[in-house]
Each structure stands twice: as structure tokens, then as C-alpha cells.
Amino acid sequence: MASILLGASTSLFTSDDLSLVTSLIAHGQTHLFDGWSSSSLSENDSSSSSSSSNKLSLMAQLRVLDDAYPGGLVAYITNAQRLLSESRLGTNPLEGYTPSVPSGEALPWGSEKFEQFEERGFQHAASGKVAFVLVAGGLGERLGYSGIKVKLPYDTAREAAFLQLYCEHIAAYTSSYATTSTSASPKKTKHKTTSPFAIMTSDDTHAQTLNLLERNEYFGLGRDNITLVKQEKVACLADNDAKLALEDNNRWSVQTKPHGHGDVHMLMHSSGLLDEWERRGIEHVVFFQDTNALVFRAVPAAIGVSLANDFEVNSLAVPRRAKEAIGAITRLTPAQGSKNRAMTINVEYNQLDPLLRASGGAFKDGDMNDKNTGYSPFPGNINQLVFRLAEYRRTLQRTHGVIAEFINPKYTDGTKTAFKKPTRLECMMQDYPKSLGPEAKVGFTTITPNLAAYSPVKNSVAEAQAKFAKGDPTHSATSGELDVYASHCAALRLVGCSVGSPMSVTFLGMERLALPPRISFAPSFAPSLGHLRSKLPAPRQVAISARSSFVLEGHCENVILESLELDGALHISVHHPRCRLVIRCGLVQNAGWHWTPLEELEGAETSTSPVTEEEAMRGFRVHRTETARYEFFHGGRYVLE
Ligand code: UTP
């Protein structure tokens, strides 16, 4: 069939190419090869954008797309045709399911129960039984940052990138840390173990991620310990028949778009990483996303919950208000006699209300808050997941990591016959439980408040302002940074320190934002709440005023904060891993640092020092007027008095 259409071009291609062409023609893709019957590479076509764009380049791209998708392009097109038909007919994938609240733990941050789970989970990770996976292939279009998202500093006090923070957290498990939450001094394990870390990138983020790691010596985690796996994009579809869409300005190239973070499962399988991790004795895998600086506050407790409940899949969750635009972790039970399976899964917020109403019974009024708690009984999904490796690996061997896909075409009108622009299949990592049997133990861990787990940086200034006007969380660079400080302040208060109340500020026109004391500690100081307790033997002797800034960074494993009265800015850097430092300060007072709204900057200042992209995203500039600055370069015992 291929040779009839390709005519004299046939000789340009290998037999494998020709069999791919034959399959594509059989699946409605004849348009790709229109006008190919002559032997030349690109004749009769003036739209070619360069001499390297021609029949050969298109064929090479088709082969890449064919190789990257399980079952090849034919499987992709067949799946797309089925999903497009369901979309046109308005099929409801949740039809017939009865929703209920799944099993899980709700843990107030700092409660005894929280710290018990945290300690258990931390010890598990510290003994080398946990691997970490960051999905960082997203374009970040909503944020609109010119670099990759993980390169963005998560706060301005430390100015460390998100990726540095994640590596530091993983290194903290890796280091000789192991402590009981209430012991007065951290107890050390005898051996050092290294937690493996995989990062999923895409063509949009790969080179920059690698470059960031290389330039920073893998942030202390070691090159051998970090593996980058790259997801490929998938072909766009031009119409309801799933015809592959060619670029508008280049008929020798198929339009492609990201397939979604669900690709991570396929890559975990195909990369062989899971086999290697199992050989190394890894028992759990933690998945997290690119710009949530708070996630590791909750990770140890979530691992502890997984262990205690024997969860095969555990979704880290936050309390969810009824109708809030955040997915809900839901148990779905099919009607008796249905061929569908029961599962615990994320249900998108716009699907939850109709599903609950249709089910009648206790939820007949739809997505409502519980009268006692003031929250929806369904936990809010934040897409940070803990999987048990053994079952995960077995499932992927069966499914090859293929995740249930969906399609979201934007139609030109109600007839649903044409799209506004080409669409594509997508998949989400949280849909993995759809691959499991009804007996799989899938649960959740909700940590309250959000400050203990979740404050993503996703939205541009304009989107943040619009969300702010509606009273919704802004999930912006501004809120992400303020929440880092708020979370540190809350942790210090939980263990008994005195910390000043936030000041009320206006950034980017968003009024009455809470600017807490700017406290930012490297994870090596206290990677868990239990460690923070052990690092502050006399918390009542630590007082930090509202206008203060306090940064503690570097190798802080052996730093003890005994006493401090801070009213200004204190910045301590420990450069040597065997530096033992006791902070035993009286009053540290100076002019400190100021978070100045951009609107208040003088013209003279901005002409010599223009507003940076990062400042513009946050709405302020930090003026470091006066700082008590201490750096420790050598091993030994020191007391800062
Ligand atoms: P987001 O929902 O934030 O999407 O992804 P995004 O693509 O990064 O940003 P927008 O929508 O363009 O603004 C959640 C997580 O999933 C990763 C992101 O990097 C982020 O950590 N992701 C997303 C991938 O790894 N691959 C994808 O194809 C999409």
C-alpha cells in the first residue's frame, strides 16, 4: 500500500519505514503522504521552512513518535479515535459509580500522631529504603518564567533554587541523620546511605535541568545518584478522525505537545530504574512536583502512614473546601454486575458535585462541607504520591506504564465537528490507581494546615491578581515565598519559640498580605519537626521579632540553636560538614532587611538597578540594609555568643 502512494519516493525509505507508512495509511493518515509520488525530497511544496525539512525529516519524526508511544503510532491513533468519539457523545466515564470517602489519615501538623508517623517515615528513608521522583517536564506556561521552574529561587532570603532545596532534602535523608523526635540530641546511624533521585524532564526542560545540576555539582547529591529521564511529546490531532496535524508553516513536521506527567510511569518502567532500585533495597517511591517548597515537610509523615497502613498507593492531600478547584481523592464503587472495578482515585472538582448528587444517599446535596470540620469530607489532591515499589514494579511490568488517557478538545461550536486548534492525548500520574485491582490498598494522608505541605508556584502575576480578587489561593511566586517563611515561623512556634506576628503588606496590588519574619533554614538543619525539637533544647530562649530575617544554610547538621533574641537580620553559613556550632546569642539587633514593594522603589534606583524578572514576579525588592553575618569554613567546635 505504501509503494502505491509513495511512487518513486519508495526507494528513499527502508522497509521499516514503508511498513510504518502502510499502517498509518490503514489508520486514516493518507494526508501525511499527499504529493509524495515523485522521487524528489520535497518538490511541489514551497512551505518547507528549510532544506532539512523534507520527506526524510518527516519520516524520521514519525519513527520517533512511533517508538516513544507504547504500541506505536497506530495505538496512539486508535486510542485517540475512541476517546474523541466518547468526547463527542459526551460519555461520562464516572457513570454508574458510587462515591465514598476512602481510608486514610488526617494529621494535624505537630500533633503527637503526626510526629510518630514522621519519625517512622524519616527512619525508613534514612535507612535507604526510599527513592524520589520529581516530575519536571512541564512547560510552566501559566507561570511564564523565562527559565525552567526548578531554577527559580523559592525565596529571596536564601535565594536557593527549588531544585537545590529538593536535593538538600534528599541529602538530609542520605546523611547520617536518624533521630527520635524527642531526644535532646540527634542520634546518628552507623552507615551512610544514598537515596536515589530521578527527574523527569522534557525537550522543554532537559538541557536547562542538566545544566543547572552540572553547574552546581549536583547540589551535593552526586552525579551517580541523580538520573534524568526525558519524556517525548505526542502528536497533535487535527479532527475527530484523529488525523495527525501538520505544522501550519511546515508540512514536513507533525505538531507535537506534551503528553502530561503520567508519562513518568512509562519512563520508570522503560528506563529499568525500578529494577535497579529494587535490587538496592528500595521499598517506597515518592513522587513530587516542580515548585512546591513545602512538600518535604509532609513527606516523612506520609511515608510513615504508608508503612503503618500497608498502603500500596498513598496520596498526600490537603483539606479541601467544598467546590474548591482542586481534585478530590474518592473511592468509586461500580454498580453490581458492572465490568468496571472499584478504585480510589482523584476526581476532578467539576466532576465531583454531579457524581455526588447522582449517587443520592449521604451525598445527595452534592459537594458540601462537613458541618463539624468545615471542609469537604473528600481530601484535596496535591499530586504528591508515595508508592510501594514491589507492587508498582509488578503493575508496570503488566501495563508497561501505560496510564489511562484523556482528551480535551476545544470545539468550534456545539456540533462538536471541528476543533479550535489541534488537540492531543494526555495522561496524569495520579491516574495510576486505575491500573490496579479492586483489592489494592490505596489511601491518603491529609496534613493540616496547608502550610505543612502545599504552596505551589504556578501562576503569573495577572492570574494571581485575578485569583486574589476572588478570594482564592494565588499559587504564585509571591504566595510561594511568603508561605516558606510562614511555614518556618509556624514550625518554630510549634516547638515553643516566640516568633513575631506577620506584618500587613501590599505587593502587586494585592492588599493585606501577611509578611511573616523572613526565616529560611536549609533542610540540613532540621529536615523534620522532630529534628527541629532536637536542635532547640531550650526553645523558650529563642525569640524572633516581626521585622527580623534569619537565614541558616550550608552544612547545618551539627548546628544547635540554644538561645537567640533576634531583632534585625542574621545570616549564618556553615561551609564544613564537621563544623559543630552552638548558637548561644543574647540580643542581635540591627537595621535588618526590608521587603520593599516595587511601586515604592525610587526611579534613580531602578535606572541603575533595573527590576529583575524574579522581583517582578514577586512584587518586591529586598534591601539588605544591615546584617549580622557569620560564616564557618572549617571543621571544629564553635560557639556563637
Ligand atoms: P502543571 O500542572 O504545573 O503543568 O504540572 P505545567 O505544564 O508545568 O505548567 P502549565 O500548565 O504550562 O502552566 C504539574 C507537574 O507536572 C510536571 C510539571 O513540571 C509539574 O511538576 N509535568 C507536567 C511534566 O513533568 N510533564 C508534563 O507533560 C506536564
Image (cartoon, grey):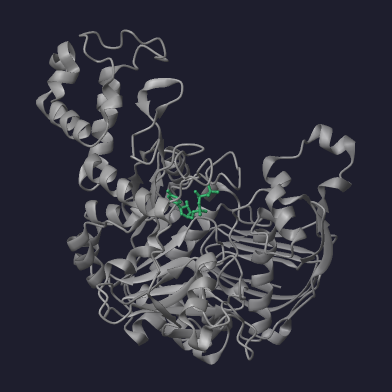
Q: Nearer the viewer, residue 47 or 213?
A: 47
The spot of residue 615 in percent (x, y) is 72, 46
Residue at the image point whose x is 29% and y is 82% from the top: 336
- 491 vs 47: above or below: below
Q: Can you tell which quarter of the image residue 145 is in? A: top right
Residue at the image point whose x is 46% and y is 24% from the top: 248
Q: Nearer the viewer, residue 487 or 13?
A: 13
- 252 vs 286: above or below: above
The spot of residue 496 in percent (x, y) is 68, 86
- Quadrant where the N terminus sits is top left
Q: Can you tell which quarter of the image residue 430 is in? A: bottom left
Note whether residue 625 is visible: no
- 153 vs 532: above or below: above
Residue at the image point whose x is 64% and y is 65% from the top: 484
98 sits left or right of 609 in the view: left
Q: Nearer the viewer, residue 632 or 511?
A: 511
The spot of residue 572 in percent (x, y) is 65, 62
Residue at the image point whose x is 56% and y is 78% from the top: 366
